[in-house]
Image (cartoon, rainbow, N blue to C red):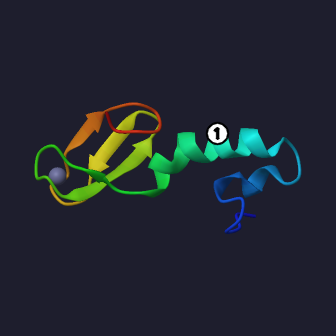
Amino acid sequence: MATKKVGITGKYGVRYGRMIKERVIKATEGLTISHKCDACLRFSVNRVSAGIWQCGKCGRKFAGKAYKPA
Ligand SMILES: [Zn+2]
């Protein structure tokens, strides 16, 4: 369960250390926020799957990194 304290790493329960969880949060924070679209310049880019991103406004789909668009 994801809680405010552990964020996305809540799914790991009590396993793994705090430092590892903080690294996971940093690496995956791009998944939960919207990114800026290069085409329409609006913050509507969300991840479709690993490395694939799509803008919700103009529909532009492009390849990026697994956890960040560029
Ligand atoms: Zn766009």
Where 41 falls versus 68 (above or below)? Answer: below
Q: Amino acid at mark 1?
A: Arg
Q: Horizontal and vertical percent for residue 19?
A: 74, 41
Q: Quadrant of the N terminus?
A: bottom right
Q: Position of residue 62 (x, y in %)?
A: 26, 36
Left or right of 61? Residue 58 is: left
View extreme (bottom): residue: 4
Q: Nearer the viewer, residue 19 or 69?
A: 19
Residue at 20% across, 48% down: 37
Q: Nearer the viewer, residue 60 or 43?
A: 43
> To which residue does mark 1 refer?
23
Q: Quadrant of the C terminus?
A: top left
- Number of numbered callouts drawn: 1
Q: Please name the residue shown 74% across and 38% down the image.
A: 20
Q: Residue furthest right?
A: 14
* Residue 35 x/y as whole percent: 31, 51
70 or 52, nearer to the observer? 70
Which percent across, then down, holds residue 51?
Answer: 41, 33
Q: Is mark 1 within 8 Å of ligand 1?
A: no
Report whether 16 appears left or right of 34. Answer: right
- The residue under the point 19% across, 45% down is 60
The local crowd at label 1, few if under 14, some if 14 to 19, many if 20 or more residues have their Cα within 10 Å, is few
Q: Is residue 47 above or below residue 20?
A: below
Image quadrant in which you'd find residue 3: bottom right
Please tell me whether residue 10 is drawn above or below residue 24 in the rendered image.
Answer: below
Is residue 1 rendered to the left or right of residue 45? Answer: right
Tell me the element at label 1. Answer: helix
Question: Which residue is found at the position 15% from the left and 55% from the top?
Answer: 58
Which residue is most to the front?
19
